[in-house]
Image: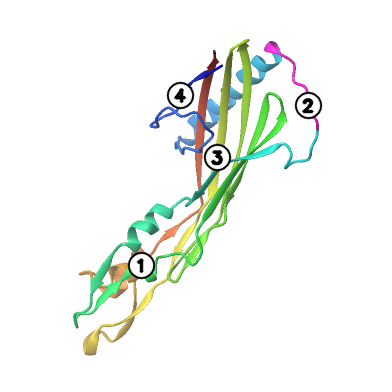
Amino acid sequence: MGSAVMVLGHLHAPFVASMAATCVPFGRRHRFAVAIGLFLSQVAGIAHGQGIGLSQDDGIWGRSRLVDLTNGGLNSDLVRSTSAGAFELSGGQQVDLQRWYSPSFPNLSATFLTEVSPNIGVIWGGAIGERGEKYTLGPTATLGVVFRTSISHNLTREMEMSGIYGGNLRERACRGDFGAIGGVQRVNCRLAASLLSPEETLDYLWKEPARAVSVLRLIVQWSF
């Protein structure tokens, strides 16, 4: 027996047949309106289609499985792109940004799916965050729910609503020696060799607040 999976309503992403998280931002009002509407219609469909019986309680780990394990998180790509840069001092010495913008420990992100009933699952997990010499990336939390409905004996529908929260980013300045005229000043490490004055570069230090990114996905699976 095989199966075919179709993913509907999954914006800007290829067809998938797994629970790997894909982030799709929505406006706040639009996100809540869509989520509430789909939540109510899905609950109604489950109640009408078949009863929900609680599975045998084997504890949270007995009813959970790992569905995603990655290295990264919100704002991680921004830090990674910076770590590949470099600049040259007035004396010709090369300064590699990697040592300042590489994490001392990888930002591992794990996502789990826990069965609440045969038709409902809870998505949960998060990332531990990371720290480099000149930046700190806060932890993130992943929370969501999955509904499963049997449309017929070989056709099922799944809907996932989840969100990733957190990931605040903060950057620390460097101290640079700008010679007899400028002296030693605080400066944005990434912009120390730019045409901006050291004081002006401080306005561009990362001060990214915690974020919320939503995921909305509908999957139709046909078994044959």
Tell me: 50 left or right of 216: right
The region drawn magenta spans 48-56
Cα separation, mark 1 vs mark 4, equals: 39 Å
Label 1 environment density (alpha carbons within 10 Å; few <14, some 14–19, many ≥20): some
- CB atoms of marks 1 and 4 within 8 Å: no
Choose the circle earlier in sequence order: 2 or 1. 2
Name the image quarter holding the N terminus. Answer: top right
Answer whether residue 144 is visible to the viewer in this image. yes
Cα separation, mark 3 vs mark 2, equals: 25 Å
Give the residue at mark 1: 98
- CB atoms of marks 3 and 2 within 8 Å: no
The residue shown at (64%, 15%) is: 45
Answer whether residue 40 is visible to the viewer in this image. no
The front one of 200 and 75 is 75
Does 23 lie within the magenta span? no
Cα separation, mark 2 vs mark 4, equals: 29 Å
Place residue 156 in its image quadrant.
top right
Picture coordinates of residue 6, whole percent (x, y): 47, 20
Give the residue at mark 4: 9
The front one of 191 and 100 is 100
Kind of residue sitting beneath label 4: Gly
Choose the circle earlier in sequence order: 3 or 4. 4
Q: Which element type, helix, strand or loop, lies under badge 4?
A: loop
Vertical arrangement, residue 144 with respect to residue 104, above or below: above
Vertical arrangement, residue 93 with respect to residue 52, above or below: below
| Nearest to viewer (mark 1 / mark 3) | 1
Give the residue at mark 3: 163
